[in-house]
């Protein structure tokens, strides 16, 4: 593989020329970018070359996108219009011609008087009529994922989006220009070609793919890449062409252990050694989500206040969540390595435990068919609803479900935390067989 790294100003930099076949579409001639790696930290350039390889792959993908399909002429024309506008000292074409006022158009035309205005590119620049580069569905999807990835609480979402789209959507609509995917005719036919083969056999996956396509096409419309109704929308469109997913494949809830079996299970679980077993025990005692426990850090724990504060960035509802800690939960925290960043460290230094570790513990205990880790939240909810006089809103807040703002505001006043501490002590007592 070619080496695109050079040393400059104490840093490794990525540098390469634009290939001749792309030169007309990319005026940069030479592309340069810092790898962010200091020469002193990587004297042989091993890490720097890996980063440079990734930069080069992204650049190659960019160049391919420019010349694929019918985009090349649009790129050339649009760039010519931009250059003509600069040469004539008028503003460059803008994305939305409707934003151009009549007064501004007249002003721009006046600036051309007495000059050579027969240049087609110049005229196109004046009227914002230069065709803008097209963009296909796959390009939109990749940009959508990149734009929304920082806001997803679960890092796996990006890979799940990419994987399902690559498997089911890209082979059919990946290279189709998004402005050609409308609600009528071919657009709807294309969406149906994606969904129909899997709607009756992989209904849940098909429903997620539909929702993801709808979000991407809405994003493309908001960015000005397409117009019109969304052919992937469900209500009032696809619901007339496909049966509701609930009628095809009834929703399967997470397998949950009956709450009456929890005390006996917890006794067996405490006899199992290992970090995964303690993490599972902690998950049950706090009624938390698996991802919240796996990524829990010691810095989030306040032992004096007996509180675990999960930041909003890791919560499904994007709100900070406070979890009262029982004596048993605190004992687990104190038993974990005090010098690790994560409360339940993984096998690799500085990394959290695998997301399958707790489920594997259940499997080794012979309960894989009866319960999943996430199902213990339902177990806790059933226990609270059927054995105590706990208000529904309090139980919903304990498992970090979003409740009505007015109700939540009321429970945030006065003794709300005291009630939640008592709730988790009662749950601990039940789990311990009390």
Image (spheres, helix red, strand yellow):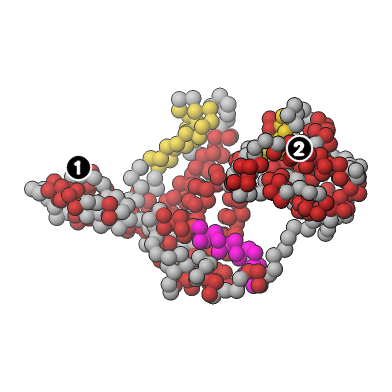
Q: Nearer the viewer, mark 1 or mark 2?
A: 2
Q: Does residue 79 appear left or right of residue 19 in this picture? A: left
Q: In x, y percent, where is residue 202?
A: 66, 67
Residue at figure coordinates x 76%, y 37% from the top left: 421
Q: Which mark is residue 185?
A: none
Query: Which residue sits at x=43%, y=65%?
Result: 229
137 or 242, nearer to the observer: 242
Question: Can residue 294 be spotted in the picture?
Answer: no
x then y, percent, for residue 426: 82, 42
| Residue displayed at 55% across by 45% down | 151
Q: Residues within 10 Å of mark 1 (few under 14, many from 20)?
A: few
Which one is nearer the viewer's eye here, 308 or 215?
308
Q: Which percent across, then down, holds residue 169?
A: 54, 63
Magenta segment's dominant SS is helix
Residue range highlighted in magenta: 198-215
Determine the residue positioned at 73% across, 60% down: 253
Lateral position of residue 110 relative to residue 39, left or right: left
For mark 1, what is the residue?
89
Is residue 207 a member of the stretch shown in magenta?
A: yes
Q: Which label number is shown at residue 421?
A: 2
- Decide which of tag 1 and tag 2 comes sooner along the chain: 1
């Amino acid at each position: 593989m070619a080496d695109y790294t050079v040393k400059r100003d104490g840093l490794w930099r990525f540098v390469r020329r634009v290939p001749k076949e792309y030169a007309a579409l990319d005026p940069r001639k030479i592309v340069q970018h810092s790898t962010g790696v200091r020469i002193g930290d990587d004297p042989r350039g091993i890490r720097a070359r890996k980063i440079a390889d990734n930069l080069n792959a992204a650049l190659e993908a960019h160049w391919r996108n420019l010349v694929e399909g019918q985009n090349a002429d649009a790129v050339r024309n649009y760039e010519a219009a931009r250059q003509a506008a600069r040469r004539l000292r008028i503003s460059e074409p803008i994305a939305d011609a409707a934003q151009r006022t009549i007064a501004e158009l007249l002003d721009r035309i006046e600036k051309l008087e007495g000059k050579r205005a027969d240049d087609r590119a110049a005229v196109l620049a004046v009227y914002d009529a230069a065709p803008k580069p097209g963009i296909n569905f796959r390009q939109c999807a990749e940009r959508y994922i990149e734009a929304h990835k920082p806001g997803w609480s679960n890092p796996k979402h990006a890979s799940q989006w990419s994987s399902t789209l690559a498997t089911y959507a890209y082979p059919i609509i990946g290279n189709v220009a998004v402005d050609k995917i409308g609600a009528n005719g071919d657009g709807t036919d294309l969406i149906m070609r994606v969904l129909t083969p899997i709607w009756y056999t992989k209904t849940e996956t098909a429903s997620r793919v539909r929702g993801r396509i709808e979000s991407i096409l809405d994003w493309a419309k908001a960015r000005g890449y397409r117009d019109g109704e969304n052919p992937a929308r469900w209500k009032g469109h696809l619901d007339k062409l496909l049966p509701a997913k609930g009628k095809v494949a009834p929703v399967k809830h997470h397998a949950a252990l009956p709450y009456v079996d929890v005390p006996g299970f917890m006794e067996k679980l405490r006899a199992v050694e290992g970090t995964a077993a303690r993490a599972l025990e902690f998950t049950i005692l706090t009624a938390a989500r698996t991802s919240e426990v796996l990524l829990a850090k010691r810095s989030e724990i306040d032992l004096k206040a007996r509180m675990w504060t999960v930041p909003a960035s890791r919560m499904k509802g994007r709100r900070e969540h406070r979890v009262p800690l029982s004596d048993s939960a605190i004992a687990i925290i104190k038993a974990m390595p005090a010098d690790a960043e994560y409360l339940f460290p993984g096998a690799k230094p500085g990394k959290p435990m695998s997301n399958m570790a707790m489920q594997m513990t259940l499997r080794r205990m012979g309960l894989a068919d009866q319960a999943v880790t996430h199902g213990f939240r339902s177990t806790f909810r059933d226990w609270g609803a059927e054995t105590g006089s706990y208000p529904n809103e309090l139980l919903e807040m304990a498992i970090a479900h979003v409740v009505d703002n007015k109700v939540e505001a009321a429970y945030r006043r006065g003794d709300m935390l005291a009630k939640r501490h008592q709730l988790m002590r009662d749950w601990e007592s039940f789990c311990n067989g009390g």
